[in-house]
Every structure is written in C-alpha cells, then in structure tokens.
C-alpha cells in the first residue's frame, strides 16, 4: 500500500529555504540533481558545503580528503587548522542571545554571545590552570544548562577531549566510561530536579570516582540550592572558583582532525563503544544538517529535548552556535508539572525548531490534545524528530492535533557514529508519515540485500557507499572492533545496523535495528552492559537481555537470568531491577526479570538474543539448528504465557 504525502511545502516556503540557496550556489536545478552530484563527487560537495557554512581554516588545509589509509579511515581537511570553539564564537552578533535556558522548576536564564564568550574563556583558563592539557579526556556529567555549553566549548578551546555522560547514568556506567578514556577531570552538578524530586548527581559521581584513580579534579556546578555531597579537599572545586583561576585563555592550535569528542554508544556485545569525533567532523556535519534540513540560520531559535550524553546534546550546541542561532535548552521532565510543559517552553522561547522523540510524543498524546492548545506555537516552523522509528498514531497526533497540519515533522535518522543524519526530510520536499523524503546531501545511502546488492521495495540493510565529513574516526582504543562493526560485512561499505526500505515514490522508511542493541525511550544500551550488572549479583550465574515492545517507551528491557541456587523470590526480581537502574540509570530499569533454567546459546557459546526475544514474544524463531538446547526456547515461551 502506498503511503500518501501528508505535507507539501508551498512555493514561498521553498523560496525561503536555505537549501534552495545552497542548490543555487552549487549551480544545480533542484534537490534531486544536487543530491546526485553530491554523492558522485563528495569532495566537490564538501568544498561547496564549507563555503556555504563560511568555514575558514588557519592554516588552510592542504588536502580536502585523504583515503590513503582506506576509506574506513578517511581524513578530512588534512593539514588545516581549525578549532570549533573559535568558530562558534567568531563573527556573531555579541548582543544576540546565544543560549536560552529553562529549568523544570520555572527558572530561566539567557546568555548573549558576548557573555558566553567571556564564560568560555574563563572556564578554559581555569581548566588549563588545573593542568588539563591538549588531548586529555574530561567527563561532562551536567544537565542541559548554560554552563554545559560553556564547558563543552572551553574544552574544545584548550584542545581537550569532551566525554559527555548521560545524567541518568548510575555510578557503574560513569566509572566504566571514565576509566576507558583515562579521564583526568569531570564536571558535574551538585543536584538537579526531575519530576519535583532532587537527583543528587554529585553523590553518584563520588561513588563512581571511587573506582577512577586517574580523575584528579571534579568541578561542581550549583544547579539547585540543595545540600550536595561533601566536597573532597584537593579534588573538588566549584564552577565559580574554576572560573576565577588561571590567566591563559588562549585557543589551542588544534588541527581539523584533532579529537574533539568521545561519545559513548552501546553495541550488542562487550563494553560500550567510545565513538571518536574530530573538530572538523561532528560540528560541521551537525551545522550542515541543521541548515539544510531544518532551515536553521542566523537568529533561528532551536530547542531539542535531549541530554548531553545523547549525541543530540553536542549536535544542538555545536550546530546551533556555528550557524549563529540561539540554542534553547530545557532541563527537566518535559511533561512536568503538567503535560503542556514542553509547549509552554516552545511558546515562551519563540522556537523556530522543536526537537522531540517519538517516545515523548506517545506520552504526551496519552494526556490529550487540549494541553497542546493552551499555548501558541506561532513561531514554530517545524518539529524535529529522531532517536527511534515512529508509529503512525503518534506521528499523526503531533502533525494534526498539535501542529494543526501546518507544521511539518522533519524526521531525522542517523546516529552517534554519523555525527548527524543519513536520512532526513527537508524544506523543499513533501513528507510522508513515519518516513524520510531523502538521504541527507552527501550521504551515499543505499539499501542492500545479504549479498550487498541494491534493492528497492523490500527491506534490507541500510548502508553508506562513500565517506562523509562527519564520519566517526573509529572507536577509542579498539580499531578492530570499529572495522568489524561497520566495515567488514560489505568490504569498503558502511553497514549502519538498521533495516530500511525505499518505497515506489523514493521515500525511505526505517524498519528497526538489524542487531541486538536495545533502545529505550531513544537511548541505546548494549545487552552485554545490562547482563554484566545482573551477573554481578551473587545469586545470578548467567543473564541475557533483549528489547521488547513497550507502548510508551518504544522498547523496554526484558532480562533472563540463571540463578545459582534455583530460587527466585519476588523480592529478588525487584532487587535485580533496582540494581540495573542504580548502575545504568532509572530509564534502563528492566520491565521483566525472568528466571530460566538456561540461556539459549549456540554450540560455540554465543548467546542467541534474537531467539530469546522471538520466544518471549511468541514470534517465529526461524533457524534454530545451531542451538545447543532448543528446549530452553519453549521454557521462555511458557514463562511469558504464565
């Protein structure tokens, strides 16, 4: 069945689009012609993009693209000098608002570009005085607030590598990531509010850092007037004292390919993956997608409901500031103290772009459309959406009930490893519910079968056939795992790990993950990470974790455990759920923990999570010939029915 187009831009909207200006700059007749040329000649396209974004290099780069080490290790703007913090703060109107902020409790603040620059310089000088140097890793465990923006830019300014951390993480997740990168410093808040409760983030960090001997300093930002965990002498200092020390705030001479970020995401096996991004990669891809797909430019006001630990946090900061826009931050539960909270935020901040996840929209839709009508969305030009595939009903609710059929939903899909989007709607093409109008410019996307052959009208693997500016510069400390994960299924071609299809009109649809990664409310977690926490309990011998459908979150975690003594009291089930929530964060608390006789495995010991999930959901299991004990699947199926 053909899905009809739900929204079409009129001629005025097309004329106003920055994408139209870019098509004209490139000398092409329309988007289709430009897209074709952008993937046939990615160097030409990238040169045009850098010109459009007004990016300058000091010194100029010697070579735009170098694939002498293989396409997997493509290097961009080789020999060029580029510091993203300098680029974000140069050439902007000093009086314009750079960062606007609202807290859950109703507190608001705003910093101009002038004020942001002052704070970045002070923070940079303070960090340098603490001994943080170029290449050092620093954790950023802060809610979305102005100091978070200043910290991210200050770290870039001195050439340090920011490691954003999800504020919902427990101590185990924080410690694992800080030890993996050898972090020397961490920034956190004393506490922050969620649904009216106080989250004692400093106490969580203290527990984590008891396992992190390399961390020498902790900078504490006062988010709430709340008695936080005690300050550790010689290690801890306040944000204010950090910004009062040091005198050298000069920008480090960073190269375009110098590391900027290590953003963690989780895979299906082993420890979380630290995705490495460079100064000229992640920020410029973010800005390009923002400008061309979301029509963000000078004085645009863009807000996205996100966390600094999700790639959309850094994406929002770098992209919005590079383009001279206003970055609007919201810190809190977006439906508290009432379901209209996020619409009030959009109204008060005069947002032109509001980014939401399908999970959040499902929760808001359940409260009814009358809440959305309490506030005006007159300034809003589009909704943004990413994090997971849509279901039709919440998509229609957002478009028709909230947006009244006039505000398009710009669907956006890519990932941390991409630094932005592979697929996205844009201001010059119509949108279909739950779909994508086209790949992003410069992204040589394709859908292939198991043999790597292009297919249309059927589900296949989403791949990318050419390098792009924002591509990951590998996994921190694990190049072989990076190659195994993305490049070796189809040699020389990036396999993203999503199933996708292209319909007869050329629109794209994501059909879900092709691996076992679990995505809860838009946040990815590897099953191995959940399993490690469960097996850490003295009563648990083995564990397997899978994602299962959830009406509100999209997916929830179902965990299966083999006990040492065979007894499984209800108290133990709750204890195991709480253990995962404590170590990995409350959003990742399992919906089910089920005791089983054994975990289905292949004869060589590999856990077959795909079959575990199918048995639990009552779906066909397919080929089970490799299993060591097929009766374990029957036991899982019976447990679900009981």
Image (cartoon, rainbow, N blue to C red):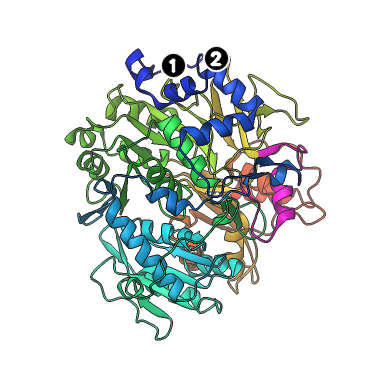
Q: Is residue 177 above or below residue 265?
A: below
Q: Is residue 63 above or below residue 577?
A: above
| Crowd rating for badge 1 (residues with CA inside 10 Å; few <14, some 14–19, many 20+) | some
Which residues are drawn in magenta? 472-495
Q: Is residue 509 above or below residue 238?
A: above
Quickly name the residue at label 1.
Answer: 5
What is the CA distance from the residue labelled 2 to the residue labelled 1?
10 Å
Closer to us: 257 or 99: 257
Q: Are marks 2 and 1 in contact (CB under 8 Å)?
A: yes
Q: Is residue 539 above or below residue 266?
A: below
Residue at (39% x, 29% y) in the render: 409
Residue 346 seen in this snapshot:
yes
Quickly name the residue at label 2.
Answer: 505
The x, y position of residue 97, in whole percent, is 26, 47
Q: Secondary structure at mark 1?
A: loop
Question: Mark 2 or mark 1, which has the lower sequence index?
Answer: 1
């Amino acid at each position: 069945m053909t899905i009809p187009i739900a929204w079409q831009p009129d001629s005025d909207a097309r004329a106003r689009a920055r994408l139209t200006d870019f098509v004209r700059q490139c000398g092409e007749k329309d988007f289709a012609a430009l897209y074709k040329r952008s993937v046939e000649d990615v160097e030409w396209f990238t040169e045009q993009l850098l010109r459009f974004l007004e990016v300058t290099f000091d010194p100029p780069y010697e070579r735009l693209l170098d694939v002498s080490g293989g396409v997997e290790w493509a290097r961009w703007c080789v020999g060029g000098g580029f510091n993203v913090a300098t680029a974000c703060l140069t050439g902007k109107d000093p009086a314009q608002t750079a960062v606007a902020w609202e807290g859950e409790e109703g507190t608001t603040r705003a910093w101009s570009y002038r004020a942001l620059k002052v704070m970045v310089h002070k923070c940079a000088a303070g960090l340098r005085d603490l001994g943080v140097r170029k290449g050092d890793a620093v954790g950023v465990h802060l809610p979305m607030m102005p100091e978070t923006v200043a910290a991210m830019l200050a770290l870039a300014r001195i050439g340090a590598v920011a490691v954003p951390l999800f504020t919902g993480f427990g101590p185990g997740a924080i410690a694992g990531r800080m030890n993996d990168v050898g972090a020397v410093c961490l920034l956190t808040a004393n506490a922050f509010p969620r649904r009216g409760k106080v989250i004692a983030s400093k106490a969580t960090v203290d527990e984590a850092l008891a396992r992190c001997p390399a961390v020498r300093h902790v900078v504490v930002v006062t988010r709430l007037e709340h008695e936080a965990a005690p300050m550790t002498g010689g290690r801890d200092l306040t944000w204010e004292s950090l910004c009062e020390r040091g005198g050298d705030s000069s920008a480090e001479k960073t190269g375009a390919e110098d590391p900027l970020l290590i953003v963690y995401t989780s895979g299906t096996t082993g420890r979380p993956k630290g995705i490495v991004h460079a100064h000229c990669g992640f920020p410029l891809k973010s800005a390009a997608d923002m400008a061309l797909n979301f029509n963000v430019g000078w004085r645009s006001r863009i807000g996205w409901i996100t966390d600094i630990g999700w790639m959309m946090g850094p994406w929002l900061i770098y992209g919005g500031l590079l383009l001279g826009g206003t970055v609007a931050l919201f810190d809190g539960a977006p439906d508290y103290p009432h379901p209209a909270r996020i619409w009030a935020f959009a109204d008060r901040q005069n947002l032109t772009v509001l980014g939401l996840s399908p999970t959040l929209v499902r929760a808001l839709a359940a409260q009814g459309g009358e809440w959305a009508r309490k506030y005006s969305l007159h300034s809003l030009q589009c909704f943004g959406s990413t994090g997971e595939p849509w279901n039709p009903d919440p998509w229609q609710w957002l478009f028709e009930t909230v947006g009244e059929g006039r505000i398009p939903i710009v669907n956006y899909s890519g990932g941390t490893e991409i630094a932005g989007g592979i697929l996205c709607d844009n201001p010059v093409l119509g949108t279909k519910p739950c779909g994508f109008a086209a790949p992003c410019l410069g992204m040589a996307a394709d859908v292939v079968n198991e043999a790597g052959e292009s297919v249309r009208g059927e589900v296949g693997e989403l791949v990318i056939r050419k390098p792009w500016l924002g591509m990951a510069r590998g996994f921190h400390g694990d190049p072989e795992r990076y190659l195994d994960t993305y490049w070796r299924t189809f040699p020389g071609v990036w396999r993203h790990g999503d199933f996708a299809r292209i319909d007869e009109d050329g629109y794209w649809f994501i059909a879900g993950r092709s691996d076992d990664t679990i995505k809860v409310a838009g946040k990815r977690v590897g099953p191995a990470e959940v399993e490690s926490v469960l097996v850490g309990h003295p009563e648990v011998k083995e564990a397997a974790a899978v994602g299962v459908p959830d009406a509100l979150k999209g997916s929830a975690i179902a965990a299966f455990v083999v006990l040492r003594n065979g007894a499984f009291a209800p108290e133990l089930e709750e204890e195991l759920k709480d253990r995962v929530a404590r170590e990995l964060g409350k959003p990742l608390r399992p919906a089910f923990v089920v005791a089983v006789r054994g975990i289905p495995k292949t004869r060589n010991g590999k856990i077959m999570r795909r079959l575990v999930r199918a048995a639990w959901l009552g779906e066909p299991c397919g080929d089970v010939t490799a299993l060591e004990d097929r009766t374990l699947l029957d036991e899982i199926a019976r447990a679900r029915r009981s």
